Each structure stands twice: as structure tokens, then as C-alpha cells.
Amino acid sequence: MSETFDLGVEAMKAQLDAKVASYFSSCVHCGLCAEACLFYTETGDPHYTPIYKLEPMKKIWRREKTFWGKLGASLGMGDELTEQDFADWETLVYDSCTLCGRCSMVCPVGNDITYMIRKQREAFSVAGYAPEGMKEASRRALKFGSPMGVTFKTLQATLSHVEKDTGLTIPVDQQGADYMTLFSSMEIVNFPEYIESIARIFKSAGVSWTISSTAFEATNSGIQIGNKEIAAELVGRVVDAAEGLGVKYVVSPECGHAYTAIRWEGPNLIGRAFNFEVVHILELLEQLQSEGRLKLKSTEQTPLTLHDPCQIVRRGGVVEQPRVLLNSVADNFKEMPDHGVMNWCCGGGGGVSANERAEELRLEVFNRKKRQLDQTGVDTMVTACANCRIILEEGIEHYEMDTEVISLTELMAEHLQE
Amino acid sequence: MIYKRERISRRMGRISFTGLLVFLLLYSLPLEIVAEETKGSREMPSVMVLNPAAELWRDVRQREGGNIGISQVRGVDSGVLINANGDRWRKFRMEQLIPIGGSILVGVFVLLGIFYMVRGKVPIEGGQSDRKLFRYSTYERMIHWFVASIFLFLAITGLILLFGRPVLIPLMGKEAFSVLASACKEGHNLMGPLFLVAVVLIFVRFVRRNIYQKGDLSWLLRGGGIIGNKHVPSNFFNMGEKSMFWLLILVGSLIIASGLVLVFPLFGQGREWMELAHVAHALGALLMIVVIMGHIYIGSVGMEGALEGMTTGYCDLNWAKEHHDHWATEVVERGEDVSNEAVERLRRNEPPSSVQLHLQEHGK
Amino acid sequence: MIGEFIDGPLWNFALTVFVIGVIWRIGSILLSGVRNDLAEPKGSAGSGAFRALFSRFVPERTVTKRGKLQLIAGYAFHLGLFALLFFAQPHIDFFAQRITGFSWPAMPYWAFIVSAELAFAGLIFLWLYRLLNPVTRLLSDLDDHVGSILVFLVMLSGCLALAQSFEVLRLLHLLLAELLLIYFPFSKLMHAFTFVMSRGYTGATMGRKGVNA
């Protein structure tokens, strides 16, 4: 028994709150969550059943919270959590769950299975059973401020390109601005068009905004690997910067879990409410549009469909805004089957995209997205999450599909009334 | 060595099976004794000259159709106090149905036992292969076991009701049997309608694969391969299975229809209808029980590899080739056969094996 | 002798175990506590919880498409069982005499029969599904089977006693029901109560986020 294992068991015990206790008490092993999980529907392997991924936590719950478990424990019998369990379940917990939350929507007794997997990851990461890719990403995030190792210097280079292309100046560390904007490393490295779009839209709508040189990264590896210390440290940097600059709002970028991290988990991680509000870029755009500050021309004739990023829509509550925005610029917007809060995940959320050994499985389950897209019969897919975007593009390439993926914010910028 | 051990265990199986048969034969002896007794007591009055009952029944039989009186009680047949059909039905039940039906059931059981002793368990000739074919979906297996459990329950309760008087009363006494009989009657009536549901589900799901095809007849002419050692190619279902399916549907419908007539006396059916329904119900059920005994025989001790498809959903490739060659060839041609490991992987209780390596990776 | 025991002391014991056990279980769950959520809500937790409590009775499309069988069997079983439990004449008489002191209208005999058929068909199907479907096979433990079988036996003994003419059969039914009551708080059967909490917690969380779950 190693020391980290004991820490893992302790961490697991610490997760057993009233929600978890009621969820395990209610679960009748009906298996319906499997039908909602793309890892099961695409592979047919029953081990990918969401609630089965929680077997280690269930063991602890049974031992700590139930009559039979306590009886067994006092007699020195019964199932105990072993280190082998951590080893056995690591891939189930990290590789085959994107924390997308579909299972939580279908459970007939109302169990929030995703919530429990997120919590179980806390114990796994403490015990040392997390994928190397995610550990590395967390390490880089702590060291450089970005899971991809993007430093402020890199950002500056990108910003100067954007400034050259648009002829606009991008405000950095501006005291007293209304909005502090965050980006994900993915956007800085792969999709600088996003930054450009933001600059043009904010200029056009007259938004007072800034970027912080100390906290520009929105993603939070701590949330994905399930480590609340790392997560709190990363959220803390943003909070310090925002409160230092005295902004009223922090804008979460087109990134799914970044929104969950800062908007929903953030205050709980640092243990207090923020002195500013957190808005998602889509919420802000929709607000600007309804206030008449964002003037759009409806000219898009290409048939479009929308991929709802799980953390923004199902787990974040930004459901209507992307639709309002899309409908205001596109004449041919077509919903996918199961759209909105029941949308199918791209397969790369919850840190799976940072986990190299999961790639094969991830591409296999992308089949689900492919079918969903095929049913729509549309070749252009709009989304609002840089991670989804990368994963979708990889899947499209792998299956040799003829689909274009575009960012909703960029689409808005293209349709600005000059 | 292993082969020898297998042979020994097979022989042991046969011996214990024979023992079971002997036990059951002994068990059914009381039936014969009771039948003798009732026969004896019925013959006695004929020796005596005076029998008021005989006079009465002669009178009743001679009155043609004029047995209906007038009664204040409203209801079907309420004016009938006595009728000859009822007595005829009673006699049929006591003197023919119970002894003959009982002997047939015991006889078939004994025959199956003898057959097993002669033929033994039909093995998969090529032995178990390393590949499997997907044969029955979860839903198909579910409705199979659904109809099976309902049928067994109805068969057991029905047999208790029919043979309880000669077989069980001598064993457990009248008091206990009256409780058992009441319980069985209520259970039989309540579960009965579910048999209708089950048969409908079976029909809808399996009818397409059970339509007779070319080649079915040659299967029949060659005795289905169970007699002799040659296997005869067949489709997804062979002629025997198809015939059993249609027996279930047709005889099952007769049993269900007559059962409904008996259990829901809401449609003005009178005694004669009930008597007819009862006769049809009993005969149909006895026939079906005999057929199902054969079915269970093949699935359990009669044939290696036959049960697997209905429990796991997958059957062995060699078994399929030997018994359902056309179907097996089709599936293999479509490339839909799977390895034993793949099936095993889906059915195992541990998490996927790729994970097992990680303890070493972590250096622990 | 045994009859009197089943009818009297054992019934009281079973009922006591059931009531105290259920309260204890619910209490211990509530006492585990939930951390106060500091994130600024978008919607109301209360109305989210209330909403989820009822909206989960209506299945999502994924379930109606891929979980049809369980959906139909599940509803048939639960509705049938509830109708039998609370609206069968003998049960109402029993409740009125032993617990409530008042009675309520019973369902007609034909409805009773229909409920029983539905409950039996549903339970048998669900249990077969548990045994045959790879997912439920993997998930199920002893508790699931014991629970299913106990409920089945209670229902079966009840229907065997339908003629209401043998005390032995009534006592058998009562005995099994008592065993079920005693087993209840220690088992998954608790979901009959805790599903309210599960749905409530999830509904509240999602309600705060402005998602209808």
C-alpha cells in the first residue's frame, strides 16, 4: 500500500456528500445511463456504462454509509477499495468519460452521474492514477499559466499579428475596463481568428475591454484531471487579475470546460463569491445584439447546423443564446436531432483530448457525431468551443467527411454591419 | 485422459438420469393405484341390482333437450338443474383424460430417458470452435424466457389441478391439497392471460424466420439428423424448430382461446361451451407439454451447445455449422462471426483488460 | 400459533423496522450535507428541483428510442404495483384496520386483474432484462436480485390468495410482505423514497444553471 493510495482513499471518502449518498441509494442498476453514453452506444462494451465507472466510489460509499457495508467492515469482511481498483478504473474514469452529462439527463431516479465522476477524479488524481497527458497539462498550466505552455510572449506575438491585420489596438492591462477577456490556448495557437473577431465585434459595439497579461488563460486543467488545489490556483489567478484591474465582467471564451471552471466551480473553489460577474462570450454577444449595439446583417445562405458544446449548453445553461445569434445571421439554420441539452458530445471533452492513449477510442466514438451530422444533411457546422472544434475537425478528417467547422463568434464578426 | 474422464462423467450423467426416471416411475405409482380404486368402486354398483342413480340418469338422457326448467335466478343456464352432457364430460375427465393423459406424460418422459440412454448427449463433432455467432438479441432471449416461465408456471399449476386428486391427495391429504388447489387455481387464472401476451410477442418476433422454406422437407426426410449420426443442413431454424413454433402458435391459440372462455364467463357461454373449452384446453395443453418436454430435453441434456444461444445470445460456430449450416455460412460470409475473446470481453465482470498494465507502469 | 405470531407481533416488528429504517436512511443521507454553492445562480434551485421531480417521469428521446423495453416494462410494473398496493380492496381493508383507521374507494375487480397482469409482466420482463442484457448483468448485485425476487414472491403469494378462503394463504402473503418490509430499508428498494432526493438535488443544481433537467 503506497502513501498516495491512502491519500486517494481519504480523498474518496471526502467526496461522499448528501448528493452522492442519495444517488447511490437511488441507483437501481437499470443501465439506462449506458444508452445515453456515446462510449457505450458506439462500442457496445458494457464496461463503458456511466454508473459502472463509479464502482470504486460505490465501494467506499457502501463501506462508509450503508448497514451491510459497515457490518462487513466491523467484521473485517466485505469489499475494500484496493489499489488495483484505481489501476483498473483509471481508463474508465479518464479515457471513456468526457463529463458531457448526457447520462445525468436520462437517469430515471435523477442521479447526476457526471457530478460523481468529476468528484471521483479528485481521488484518482490524488492517488496518482491519472493519464500522463493530463498530468503534464496540469504541470504546464501551473508553471506557465497554460496547459499548452503558451506564455504571455506567445500571446503578444499573436496579438501583434491581429493588430496588423485589423488595424485595431488591442487593450492590455487597461485599468477600469468593463470586460476582461480570457482565451484558451487553443485559440491563441490554432484559432487567432477568434481573437480578431472579438476585437472587431467589441470595437463595433463600443465595448470597453482588456486582456490581462497575468491571467489570459481560461482553460483549467485542474477541473479536468479533478484536482481542486490546482483548479483553485488557476481560478485564483484570474480572480486576482480581474479584481486588480477592477473590471465589472470577465468574459469566458469559446471553450466548454473553461466556462464551467470559472462560472460554476470558480467561486466554490476559492471559497467566496467574486467581485465581478462571469459571462460567456455567447451570452455577451446575445446581450449586445438585443441591446442593439451589435448590428448584424442576415446574409448567410449556406445551410448551417449547430454543435452544442456540452459544458456551455447542457452543463452551463447557455442554451438559447447561440440559437438567437445564429438565426439573426443565417437563413438556413437547421437543428441536429437531439440538439440542445441532449446533444451528443464530440468525444474530446473532460480532458480526453489531452489524453493521447484515448485517441483511438475517441475517434471510434466520433461515429455517433458523424451519424448525427449525416442525419442533418448539412455540411457546415457551427460551434462555440475551441476544443470541440479541434476534435470535430480531427474526426471529420479521420472519417473523410466533407464538413466545415466554424466558430459562432467568428461567424458573427463576418456578419458585422460595417 | 481428458477424453476418458469426459466419458466417465457422461456415463455418470446417464446413470443419475436413469435413477431419476426410476424414482419418477415409482412416484407415479399412486396414480395407478388410485385409478384402480376408482374403477373398482364404480364397477361395484353394477353388480347390485338396485341403483336409483342409474334410473335417474336414464330418464335424464331420454329427455331430449327438455331439461330446462324455470328459475327466478337470472343467468346463463340457470334453469338447468341436471344434464347428461355434464355427466359425460365428468366421465371423460375421470376415466379417460386423467389416466390416459397421465400415462402419456409419464410415457413420454420414460421414452426421452430411454432415448438419452441410447443416444447420449449429441456432441459438437468438431468440438467447440474459437469463434461464435450472434444468434439471439437480448429482446429475443427475453421473450423466450418470458414465455418459458409463464408456460412452466401454467403447466405446473394446471397439472396439479388435473392430477391433484389421484396423485397429490394420497400424499398430502385433503386439507393441504384444498389449499394448494385454491392457490393453483387463482395463480393459473391470473397468469393465464400473460401467456396470450407472451405468445403474441413470440409470434411477431419469430414468424419471419419460421416460414417453411425449400430444404425443410429434406431435413424432415432425413430425420433431422438426431436419428443416425449425419447432420442435415438447415436455415436459421430447422424444420423441427419451425414445426414447434407453429404448434406453439396454433395449439397455443387453442389453449388460450379455450382458457379465456373458461376464465371469463362474461360472454354468455353456458355449461356446454365450458365443457368443450375444458376438453380442448386440457388436450391442447397436454400436447404442448409433451412437445415442450422434447424441447427442454434437447436444450438441456440432449445436445451440446444448443442452450448457449438462448442464454448468452451467442452460439458456437461449429455447432451452427453442424445444425444450421445455411445460416452459419451466411453469417460468416457477411463477416459477422466474432472471436470467443470478444464475446468473453463483453461478458466479463472486470473492467477492460487494457487497464491491467497500469500497475506496472506506475511502478507499484 | 405461528399464524398469530405472523398476524400480530411480527407485523408490528416489521412495520417498526420499516418506518425507523427508512427515516434513519433518509436522515443519514441528509446529514451527509451539501456544500453551499457560491456561484451566482442563473435560475432558481427550488423550482429546478420541483421541476426535475416531475419532468423525470417523462423520458428523454434517447430512452424512448434505445430503452423502450425498460420504459414500458418499468411503467407497467410500477403502476401495476401501486394500484395493487393502495387500491385493492383487501389491502384497503387491511390499511384501514391496522394503520389509518379510515378507508378509501377500491378499484373494481377488473381493474385489479389488469393491474396484476401489468405488474407481473413488467416485473418478469425487468428481471429477465437484468439477467440477459450485458449492461444490467454487469451492474447487478445480490441486492438487486433479492429485491426483485422478494417483490415477486409477495405479488405471487398475494395472487394465490385471491380466493380469500384460506387463512394459510393470507398468512403466507402477510409473512412475505413482512420480510419485504424488514428488508426494505437495508436495500435498493429505498429508491422508492430516495429518488425524490436524487431528482431534487440534481434538479436544484441544474436549476441554478438555468438548465431544465
Image (tube, grey):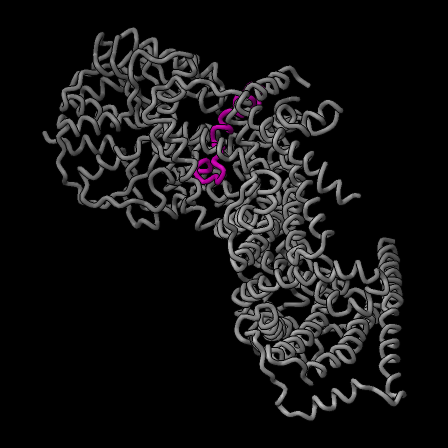
Is residue A127 covered in magenta? yes
Task: Tell me if A332 is positioned left or right of C67 in this view.
Answer: left
Q: Main secondary structure of the magenta part?
A: helix
> Quadrant of residue A336 in the image?
top left
* Residue bounds of the magenta highlight: A102-129
Residue B5 visible to the viewer: yes
> Quadrant of residue A151 in the image?
top left
Residue visible at 59% across and 28% down?
Answer: C25
Residue visible at 68% across and 25% down?
Answer: A70
Q: In the image as oriented, which residue stretches furthest toward the front?
A: B72
> Quadrant of residue A397 in the image?
top left
Which one is in front, A176 or B53?
B53
Which one is in front, B134 or A310?
A310
Residue visible at 26% across and 28% down?
Answer: A282
Task: Tell me if B287 is positioned left or right of A288 in this view.
Answer: right
Please say if B220 is above or below C166.
below
Which one is in front, B94 or A253?
B94
Residue A321 position within the rendered picture, expressed as x and y whole percent measured from the top left: 25, 33
